[in-house]
Amino acid sequence: MDVLAQSILAGYAGTREAADPYCLRVGEAAALLAGHPWRRFAVLGDSVAQGVGDLVDGYLELSWVDRIAAELRASRRDMAYLNLGRRDATAAQVAAEQLAEAVAFAADLAIVTCGGNDALRPGYRPAEVDRELTGIVRALQQRGTDVVTVSMLVLPHYPAVPVPLRPSVTRRLRTLAEHTAAVGAALDTLHVYLAEHPLCADLDIYSADGLHGNVRTHAVGAAETIRRLGAHLGNAWPAGSSAT
């Protein structure tokens, strides 16, 4: 992670990412995360947590959670990072197979993203996924962990999904986004709501698998998460401006 942190700190002025209106400005993350207290950062979830996504020319070759870890470590070099994310994991599998390790790791900051694989299936039961997510979040919070939950991007269509099924898949993913936001509000998580981000309308953000976003979506997800962490800390960008 030191190499990753150095690549972040080196800046990316002049790149496509630096010019992207939805991405972090040079120095923004450092200002927003200045003085953060977190020493042990864990990520739990599915392929979104794992960091699946194709590279894009002009954007840093880092997943969103690796970017966040790098920026956190830039402010606190001894910070430990554990990513437990696994592709295809359901919410129940995240709870059964990742939670205990995150607890044993003694994370004081955790990102939890799950439910996407449940919502992709016709048998999706929102209440069951809500219960799994609630159990994960409460178990972490009871140990003093600050938990970030995320309503991920909901795209207008997914090329990997047969055309007749796309509307129902999108509806289920939107339901997941709204339910995740509600769980976050009920449990007072640091929630990041991306489901209606303007980036969703861009048709050039898919990976080749036609399901996951590419690394540009990772850059935007990292930016919004870091902004949420900065708001929690009471920090602002530009440095010295009033927090919103």
Image (tube, rainbow, N blue to C red):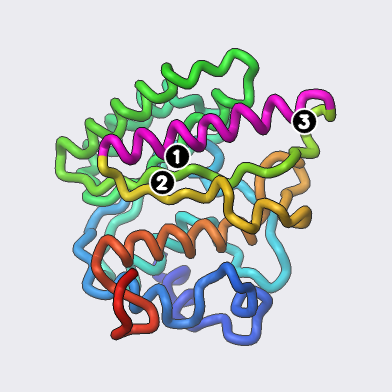
Q: Residue at x 30, y 73 (%)?
A: 243
Residue 238, located in which quarter of the rendered image? bottom left
Q: CA distance from mark 1 to mark 3?
A: 21 Å
- Please report the bounds of the magenta region as a residue range: 164-187
* Mark 1 crowdedness (10 Å alpha carbons): few <14, some 14-19, many ≥20: many
| Vertical order, 140 against 95 (above or below) | below
Q: Residue at x 50, y 16 (%)?
A: 125
Labels 2 and 1 touching (C-beta < 8 A): no
Q: Secondary structure at mark 2?
A: strand
Residue 102, located in which quarter of the rendered image? top left
- Locate the C terminus and report the quarter of the image it occupies: bottom left
Q: Amino acid at mark 2?
A: Asn
- Locate the N terminus and report the quarter of the image it occupies: bottom left
| Residue 43 placement, left or right of 67 | left
Q: Amino acid at mark 3?
A: Val
Q: Which residue is mark 1?
A: 113
In this view, the residue in front, 61 or 189, is: 189
| Vertical order, 8 against 56 (above or below) | below
Labels 1 and 3 touching (C-beta < 8 A): no
| Residue 228 placement, left or right of 36 | right
Disc marking residue 161: 3
The mark that comes first in sequence, 2 or 1, is: 2
The mark that comes first in sequence, 1 or 3, is: 1
Foreground mark, 2 or 1? 1
Disc marking residue 225: none
Whole-percent x, y for residue 240 in the image: 29, 85
Foreground mark, 3 or 2? 3
Labels 3 and 2 touching (C-beta < 8 A): no
Q: Which residue is mark 2?
A: 83
